[in-house]
Image (cartoon, grey):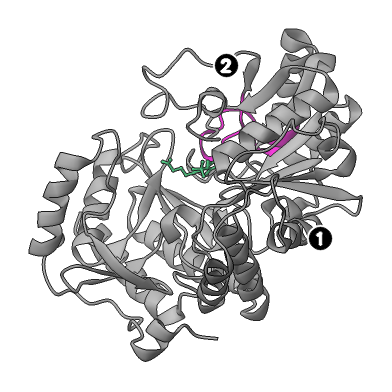
């Protein structure tokens, strides 16, 4: 099932540098961007993309760039995956919109059925579709409050949940996400997050000590019976791919259950085959009451979802949930295509293989280059933390030099981290070993050049 355009003229899955980046044609369009587009938007990679397929993006000047970011963890099935493109093409020709709460259609229901099936937990589940991760997180909180008749929400240090008013309040980092954009929503309580690389306590008892600290604070500063929900990213994404110590997530989930608190996993970035499971919580057999998905579920089209125990999802009165575009038919068709691709191309297993290549190669680099303080992550979600050699002091300057070196040679790599010093890898799961190794070779040269 390849699409006509790509089948007739496939984009070679190889890196190619035709000009400097940005090339002259991209530079002209970037100048127009500067005049026309809000200055509040960043630009991580300065090239105007005209086509993309698999793990390669082509720009206006004919450069072919290796994509190690997947549009921030979105095109897990590869850019313009044939199953996504063909289903979207079919769907857009059938109809473009009805609004699901006006006149329903099958695609929305099929996506909900698939999510109810794929998410952990054998109990009856139901889903709600929205457009973006932030919108889905907002709905998750709204539903949890309605269900529990409680108001307090527990969040964590280094968390990222979005850019809307409520989700800015849930997000930890001030610059660039919150500065000057307040006032923020209330009844949000931030708890300490064990950050293994920077943990100052006893490493052997980190999970238990951190849990004791969090639950003590919940009891003393909020009152457990006032808490509607605990929301956490099973591996923190924008915060710097912080993997909590084993036992922390299961402990939190148990505590939530004991106190009637809805345990929400924000799997917007970790979800959908990325970490070598469909969901990152599966690694420790954690079964959240509610799970938020977006990004990777629809292969590039805007779609997000809240999936939870049926009694939670059904607690709202009719008309209490909705939105004009949520679960748009084209986005639903894309999601069904992405799910098909994950199944048929065995991308859950592929995420583990990619993870091993990434982890081995990055670990070898860490042994050679002392600015790499730590290699961490799971599956095809790996990161390195860049520090001043011989210390743990964040080194965003070295990180910027490395990123720029890679950019000039046609490798797109994203950054992250509370301290702005983490290089993160989120390659499309269809990337070949050869292409991944080519990109890692460029990265190795970048560190050598420091
Ligand atoms: N929850 C865990 O990672 C989005 C942000 C990009 P939206 N992360 C990428 C940027 O700079 O805005 C994200 C996430 C987690 C929620 C979200 C929000 O998802 O689809 O961007 O709203």
Asked if disc 1 and disc 2 are in contact, CB closer than 8 Å, the reply is: no
Figure check: 27 above or below 37: below
Quarter-wise, where is residue 317 in the image? top right
Left or right: where 153 falls relative to 121: left
Label 2, on which residue? 185
**Would residue 205 be visible to someone looking at this image?**
no
Cβ at disc 2 under 8 Å from ligand 1: no
Q: Where is residue 411 in the image (x, y as percent from the top left)?
A: 29, 65
Left or right: where 208 falls relative to 77: right
Q: Where is residue 18 in the image (x, y as percent from the top left)?
A: 14, 75
Residue at image position (63%, 18%) is 188
Label 1, on which residue? 117
Residue at image position (59%, 74%) is 350
**The magenta segment:** 192-208
**Looking at this view, is 396 or 142 the one in front?**
142
**Looking at this view, is 412 or 103 the one in front?**
103
The quadrant in which the C terminus is found is: bottom left
What is the count of numbered marks? 2
Q: How far apart are marks 1 and 2 (CA)?
A: 33 Å
**Looking at this view, is 205 or 195 the one in front?**
195
Count neighbours of disc 2 (C-alpha within 10 A) and say few if under 14, some if 14 to 19, many if 20 or more: few
Left or right: where 97 falls relative to 227: left
Q: Position of residue 313 (x, y in %)?
A: 81, 39
Q: Position of residue 276 (x, y in %)?
A: 64, 64
């Amino acid at each position: 099932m390849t699409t006509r355009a790509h089948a007739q003229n496939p984009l070679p899955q190889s890196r190619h540098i035709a000009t400097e980046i940005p090339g002259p044609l991209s530079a002209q369009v970037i100048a127009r961007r500067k005049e026309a587009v809000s200055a509040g938007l960043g630009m991580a990679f300065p090239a105007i993309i005209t086509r993309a397929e698999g793990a390669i993006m082509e720009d206006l000047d004919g450069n072919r760039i290796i994509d190690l970011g997947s549009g921030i963890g979105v095109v897990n099935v590869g850019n313009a995956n044939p199953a996504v493109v063909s289903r979207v093409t079919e769907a857009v020709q059938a109809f473009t919109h009805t609004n699901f709460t006006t006149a329903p259609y099958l695609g929305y229901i099929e996506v909900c059925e698939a999510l109810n099936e794929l998410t952990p937990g054998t109990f009856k589940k139901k889903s709600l579709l929205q457009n973006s991760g932030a919108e889905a997180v907002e709905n998750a909180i709204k539903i949890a409050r309605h269900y529990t008749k409680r108001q307090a929400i527990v969040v964590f240090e280094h968390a990222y949940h979005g850019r809307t008013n409520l989700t800015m309040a849930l997000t930890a980092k001030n610059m660039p996400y919150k500065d000057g954009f307040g006032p923020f929503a209330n009844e949000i309580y931030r708890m300490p997050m064990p950050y293994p690389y920077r943990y100052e306590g006893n490493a052997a008892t980190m999970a238990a000590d951190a849990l004791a600290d969090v639950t003590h604070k919940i009891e003393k500063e909020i009152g457990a019976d006032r808490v509607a929900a605990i929301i956490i990213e099973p591996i923190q994404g924008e915060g710097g791919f912080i993997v909590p110590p084993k036992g922390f997530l299961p402990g939190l989930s148990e505590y939530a259950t004991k106190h009637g608190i809805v345990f929400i996993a924000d799997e917007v970035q970790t979800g959908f085959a990325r970490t070598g499971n469909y969901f990152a919580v599966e690694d420790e057999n954690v079964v959240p009451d509610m799970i938020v998905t977006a990004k990777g579920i629809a292969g590039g089209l805007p779609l997000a979802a809240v999936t939870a125990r049926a009694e939670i999802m059904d607690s709202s009165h009719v008309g209490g949930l909705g939105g004009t575009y949520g679960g748009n038919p084209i986005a639903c068709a894309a999601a069904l295509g992405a799910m098909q691709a994950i199944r048929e191309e065995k991308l859950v297993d592929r995420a583990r293989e990619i993870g091993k290549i990434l982890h081995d190669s990055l670990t070898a680099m860490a042994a050679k280059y002392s600015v790499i303080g730590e290699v961490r992550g799971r599956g095809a979600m790996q990161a390195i933390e860049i520090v001043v050699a011989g210390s743990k002091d964040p080194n965003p300057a070295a990180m910027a030099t490395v990123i720029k070196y890679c950019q000039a040679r046609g490798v797109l790599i994203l950054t992250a981290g509370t301290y702005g010093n983490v290089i993160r890898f989120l390659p499309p799961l269809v990337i070949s070993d050869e292409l991944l190794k080519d990109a890692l070779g460029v990265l190795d040269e970048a560190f050598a050049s420091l």
